Amino acid sequence: MLFDVTHLEKVYPNGTYALKGVSLSVEEGEFLVVIGLSGSGKSTLLRCLSRLHEPTSGIINFENRDITHIKGNDLRAYRQQIGMVFQHFNLIKRRSVLDNVIAGRLGSLPVLQSIFGKFPSHVRDEAMEKLSIVGLADKSHVRADALSGGQQQRVAIARTLMQRPKVLLADEPVASLDPATSHSVMQYLEYINKEYGTTVICNLHFLSLVRQYASRVVALKGGELMFEGGPGEIDRAWFARIYGDEAVEVEIE
């Protein structure tokens, strides 16, 4: 078992209950997709798993170790194993694509290398390898802000791969992309999952993408876990329970 989450709660300082006793398990090598309305707790769940947010209560076990409230060096070591991909790409726009990818290793490189940008050839070679994985090796010396949105998201994925993560957490990675580009990004996440065995936990809105890429699905509503199963099990009745009776499913071709 990779993650074993028990009765996880997150209450924000303004009193908002983002997660209300969520319990779930994640197997190594899964492509788990989390669905639900905006505000259902999807992003909070990923941020608690990455320990970007401090859980209010409950337990998060990672590889049979309680990491719920670890701090200091233990927290830094844990985060090195967890890669995050966000809706907004968070690239350094004026720097090259290659420099942006190398940034994924800054936490483990000597400080002077990080300051002056003088990186060993093996680090640059590894960054080029990650760019090849997402099909952008030919863009390595292009400025990040010269790329399309889908290409920038693929650079962000390559940057995350520089951490050599055991888990890749993707928070609405295609929310700001057009349908064709969305499939392109999802296909690279699928490739990383299947080819390298990297566990992927991904928040998505579109069920057409969920059905195509997920090995398993969990649904949140109002901070509570309300569905857990295969993507093919989400029929019209479940769709209405998750999203509301008046919701209409939008397909991405």
Image (cartoon, helix red, strand yellow):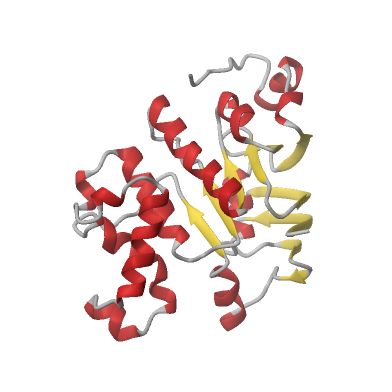
Is residue 117 something one can see in this rendering?
yes
Answer left or right for 107 relative to 52: left
* Residue 117 sits in quarter: bottom left
User: Looking at the picture, does residue 131 appear above or below residue 220?
Assistant: below
User: Looking at the picture, does residue 241 appear above or below residue 220?
Assistant: above
At which x and y percent is residue 200? 60, 49
Answer left or right for 92 relative to 240: left
Is residue 89 something one can see in this rendering?
no
Q: Quadrant of the N terminus?
A: bottom right
Residue placed at 66% from the left, 55% from the top?
11
Q: Nearer the viewer, residue 98 or 153?
A: 98
Q: Nearer the viewer, residue 236 or 57?
A: 236
The number of numbered discs placed on residues in the rendered structure image is 0
At which x and y percent is residue 198? 60, 54
Q: Nearer the viewer, residue 74 or 16?
A: 74
User: Looking at the picture, does residue 118 appear above or below residue 148?
Assistant: below
* Residue 8 sits in quarter: bottom right
Answer left or right for 238 relative to 51: right
At which x and y percent is residue 45? 64, 51
Residue placed at 31% from the left, 68% from the top?
124
Residue placed at 56% from the left, 54% from the top?
168
Residue placed at 60% from the left, 46% from the top?
194
Answer left or right for 94 relative to 51: left
